[in-house]
Image: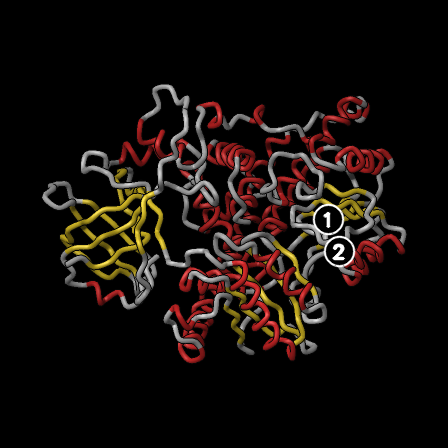
Amino acid sequence: MYFQGVKKTIVTRPLPNHPTQFGDLHPLLQRLFLTRGITYIDELDRSLNKLPSPWLLLGMETMVAYLQSALTRQLRICIVADFDADGATSCAVAMQGLRLMGAQNLSFVVPNRFEYGYGLTPEIVELVKQQQADVIITVDNGISSLEGVAAAQAAGIAVLITDHHLPGHELPKAEAIVNPNLANDIFPSKAIAGVGVIFYVLMALRSRLREANWFAEQALPEPNLGRLLDYVALGTVADVVALDAVNRTLVYQGLMRIRGGNAHPGLLALIDAAGKNAETLTASDLGFSLGPRLNAAGRIDDMTLGIQCLLAEDSQTAKTIAVRLDALNNERRDIEGQMKFEAMALLEQSLALEKQHMPAGVCLYDASWHQGVIGILAARVKDRLHRPVICFAPAGKDLLKGSARSIAGLHIRDALSDVAVAHPKILDKFGGHAMAAGLTLKMHDYPAFALAFNEVVETRLAGVDLEQKVVVDGELTEQELGVDLAVQLEQAATWGQGFPEPMFSGVFEVVQVRVVGQRHLKWVLRKPGGHKLLDAIVFFVDAPEQWLGIRKIKAAYKLEINEYRGNRSLQLMLQYFEKMA
């Protein structure tokens, strides 16, 4: 994405000098895979039988034993979910999967972020008690819920934690914990999302129930857990976890089921609301079209609505809820646009945007900001400044809620941990991943925190090149620029976070450029001296009218297949561009 005034450097990925076994794979694909750490053709196998065993996860034996006992005794189980897309899809997987295995007393609770905050808190336990639950299963949360677990156990409720967030120094004393990021856990994927963790728990549970002859005794068909992979794919991509080999397989298998017409009604309704085609859906569609609509429920209203959409059993109910989610997403966009404008104005006023004056770690706060949108705002500002950014909003009771987004080279949760160690009383609570985190602090501690955060980031980023770069996979010839290559790239792999979609660069003559909508640019380009006309588009350009009349640009772009009235054509999706003399 191009932002006015932000100059970037286009660099080509270096090609590692490794021995490879790719057979007769297209040379361009060989280069793409090699620069992404793949050296053998077998590493591209995305079949389910290539997934690692669920029993490699630490704590799985204990987890499955508790779940098997809960099913045998038909205990009342309450799923406690997070309020984002990963949490919502995790909840849907747990609800649907346990029902398929014979659970009859199931319910769920998802905290309203504006009333309860994140995770299994004592307040959420009170809600669970009203449902007279015997067992709590957390999905996509719980690893930091020391007080909540203690409160549940004091009330006689067993707690089973499934999570993927990084644990703190102390673990909650739950009956069972499955989290690939626990110390001494040997599961090969540390990047698996919360929805992937609960899916793995269900796979292990099904295996144990099969051994115990449970399905035959209960006259139940053995469940096909592949039916849940559409949820798994959506939650994994929407949570922006790295698409390592395990996640690429889970997402690919989910996409194949969606494209084959085997998605749940709620997911199909989200696809329709986003204006997408289920038969040609891609991983990027999950992240940029479906994920935001699902997330809008938790950001603006209550994620219960999103979970109800996912669990809807008929298309009409699903469509009604999806339309509501689409409206909430539009509302979120409006709020985000205003907040972004205010954030940039705040930066202009309080910071010199020249790099030599800019803090290494940027904190921004405005009393009018919406706490459900600060995460997106932090991501937008981070993209603009190429610095770790935390945006804060009021959370009541003289508290501020912050949402942090980081850049490559800085583990944001570890940075917050450094602040907490150096200033033990400044942070109320925090948690998260390498690239995203959340935190709470008292309003009067904000100035001190901002200084401490900047100091920690300066230390951690010492020696890291902070120049904004656009990393590409080289240039394409005029002959290569066609639908055939775009199709080949789309089918070759599951692209996404940590396994980036191929992006190329080149210099183009501008045949035509015009503004479409309010902030989009539609181009007709051609290679210098070439004859083929190439359609291109870029969305959300600052001051797009400044580009009218430009004769030549240098651009970084991705290949997209544009479908219109049954015709397929190539379209370049410009990710960055600059004027050439």
Viewed as shown, does residue 513 lie left or right of 364?
left
Residue type (three-letter) at the residue carrying disc 2: Ser
Name which residue type carries label 1. Answer: Thr
Residue shown at 35% from the left, 47% from the top? 471
Horizontal side of 390 relative to 562 (left or right) equals right
Q: Residues within 10 Å of mark 2 (few under 14, many from 20)?
A: many
Q: Nearer the viewer, residue 114 or 402?
A: 402
Q: Position of residue 58 (x, y in %)?
A: 73, 36
Q: Would you name the residue on which mark 1 appears?
A: 138
Q: CA distance from mark 1 to mark 2?
A: 10 Å
Q: Position of residue 56 (x, y in %)?
A: 69, 31
Observer-nearest residue: 505 or 231? Answer: 505
Above or below, comparing residue 114 to residue 203 in the picture: below
Residue 454's place in the image compared with 136, above or below, is below
Which residue is at the front of the view, 352 or 119? 352
Q: Position of residue 67 (x, y in %)?
A: 80, 37
Q: Does the image show residue 213?
A: yes
Identify the residue under disc 2: 145
Asked whether the beta carbons under mark 1 and mark 2 sit within 8 Å of each other, the answer is yes
Instruction: Work out whether 489 lies above or below 391.
Output: above
Give the quarter of the figure containing the C terminus.
Answer: bottom left
Nearest to the eye among marks 1 and 2: give it. Answer: 2
Q: Is residue 467 left or right of residue 409?
A: left
The residue shown at (59%, 59%) is 415
